Amino acid sequence: MKIAWPSFGAQPAFWLALGWLLLLAAVALLAPWLPLPYPAATPDLLHVSEPPRWPAAGPAHYFGTDPLGRDVLAGLVAGARRLLLLSLPAALLATGAGALAGTAAGYWGNQHLRLPLAAATGALGVAWWALALPGILLAYILLASTLVLMLLTRWPLPAAWLRRHSLAFPLDALVLGVATLLGAVPRLVLLVALAAGPPPSHWQLLALLTLLAWPGTARLVRGQMLQVRVQPFIAAAQASGLPPARIWWRHALPHASRPLLAYAPLSLAGLIGLESALAFIGLGQGPEVVSWGSLLATVRQDPAAWWVAAGPGLALFCTLLALQKVAKTGEKDR
Amino acid sequence: MGRWLLARLGRAAVAAWLIASLVFIGSRLVGGGPEQLALSDATDLSRPTGGGRTLARQQAAEQAVRHRLGLDLPLFYFSRTARPPVQWQWHGPANQYHRWVAGLLRGDLGYSYRDGQPVGTLLGQAVAYSLPLTGSAALLAVGLALGLGLYLAPGPAGWRRRLLLGLLAGWQVTPLFLLALGLLLLFANPDFLNILPGSGQAPEAASSVELVGYWLARSALPLLSLVLAVLPELTLPLAALLRHELKAGYATTARAKGLTAAQVLRRHALPNALLPLVTTLTDLLPTLVAGTVVVEVLFGLPGGGRLLAEAAAAHDYPVVVAAVLLSAAARLLGLVVADVLYFLADPRLRPSA
């Protein structure tokens, strides 16, 4: 995919937005080496709810402290790092998984992905054997019939019969069904319910966010693929004898993934909002994790401490606005 | 139309039941909640007197709690032994899942792990508060979106419309909790504008009229945040659709035969523009339900969202599962409402005979 970057003169807001996002990423990457006077998660109980101070010498709470005594500046940096290590990978994974599942579902539909009988019996047999279901003999029969079916393809007559009697794998129904299942409950409610157990680890939370985010991408890309699939160049590729998987991967998928230039930033923005809301409610993370959402939540204990809300709130708002701007430019770029 | 609606509803209902089942089984698999929760009170009470509490007695007490809650039964109809001589066991209907589903069909949602109250009662009290909030937010948002959409339809000419469009675009990305927090800090802040009560206790010994007035004032900010949060999603597409429709040939014809701009907009463009908007309405109720979680936690309101958040924080799984079911039901309701609206908005969908 070729991306036409707009010039600065034409789109100053886009470059400002990109600059903010890059700054955020740089701060998050360099967080361990930044000369911050205080750690993010350790409360400074001598200075609780302290307003911002800019003295000439000595370490100070430049952005003030929250009602728990945590340094707001360090919290901002830690929150940016959390975005980089949690929300961004989740959005990337969800976009990738959604693009793969959605394009595959749109390209093959319910009828066109045909599996030979041998693959079906083989998979069934292996699964039966691996799960040790009762009646292990059946697993052996299935595996033996797989071998027989594979051997039969050597003779022209049974091979032709087998080609005609292949099994259609309902890929489209499967993908749409799982997406419907995950969409049956609002994402925040599902996330809150899934976070009801012991606090999830970083990787579990990443997996949860990815799980909740991929259906949107998949639906969008599937709809796009339904239009791409009937284009003449796909028919030309099929006529030239390319294998379907190659047509899907090299020719159809890049076309159908084009709207993701605009959708991926929005999906990231949605995930950031979701993750911040979860942290704001006070779920899904241990007390030692500092994020913008959890920092914002502390302002309820001391509504006079405007500096606690202003920093993370502005940072969150600017990030989401920047992502929206990038998404809009990506939309025009199509 | 009817069969299509039924099929859609059936799919959504199956999805709701499946996701609730998954959450139920997942919560029971995670475990580690109820017996500690139920025992923590007892241990706290018995610590001063019963100093010689042995591990065996502790385990026996845990076992008793598990038995009382029905957690000593197998989880599902069948199970598989984890250790090498792998075997599958069939448990029949004496399992936790079967009991849960059977209770559900009788309208029995189980008992809260925290205080032993029936979940149905807890949820009923909470929904009695949340439903008016969500419903009025939905109605207000739709009404406001219609008005604003009609106002914005002629295009971003003039500084007022431009400002409004910019504001709406900014709102669109703002998460609800940030919006609500901003409102709380602006209007319910003892150090700034303290116009509306944001949180705290209801006034003691007040008359019922005063109490209703108090809760109405308490609900103003949450309502406002909910409406503002969903307003851009409704207004911006409506304005764009109206603008698109005004460029169509039939709008030109209508203007040519001498109708005023307002008449063209209301009578001719609006019905066509409303149709795609109904799809957005399907998502409105779930969005609002998710919004109540944030808003009720922030403003300390005794509704269903806060019940869910607190239950999740306390590992009170029966309440969590019931709340998930309830929000799935809200989505089903959204689907029905949207389909009925489709029906009303588009004469082509009505059965001709």
Image (tube, coloured by chain):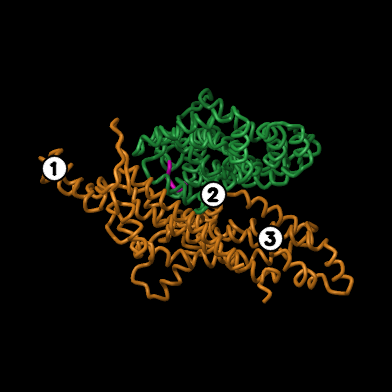
Chain colours: A green, B orange
Judge by depth and name the residue closer to the eye, A253 or B239. A253
Q: Name the residue under label 1.
A: B57
| Kind of residue indicated by mark 3 | Pro
Using the image, tell me which numbered label, if any, was put on residue B344: none
**Which segment is the magenta one?**
A280-284
* Farthest residue, direction right: B256
Q: Mark 2 points at which residue?
A: A177
| Kind of residue indicated by mark 2 | Gly
Q: Do labels 2 and 1 share a chain?
A: no
Residue B297's image quarter?
bottom left
Give the vertical position of A90 relative to A184 (above or below). above
Name which residue lies at 40% across and 51% down.
B21
- Inspect the magenta stretch and tell me whether residue A210 lies in it: no
Task: Identify the element where label 1 is drawn.
Answer: helix
Disc 1 from disc 3: Cα separation: 64 Å
A303 displayed left or right of A239: left
Q: Name the residue under label 3.
A: B276
Disc 3 from disc 2: Cα separation: 23 Å
Task: Identify the element where label 3 is drawn.
Answer: helix
Residue B190 shows in this picture: no
Name which residue lies at 34% across and 68% down.
B204
| Kind of residue indicated by mark 1 | Arg
Residue B349, percent from left and from top: 67, 68
How crowded pointer 3 is (Cα within 10 Å; few <14, some 14-19, many 20+) is rated as: few
Task: Identify the element where label 2 is drawn.
Answer: helix
- Inspect the magenta stretch and tell me whether residue A283 lies in it: yes
Q: Are marks 1 and 3 on the same chain?
A: yes
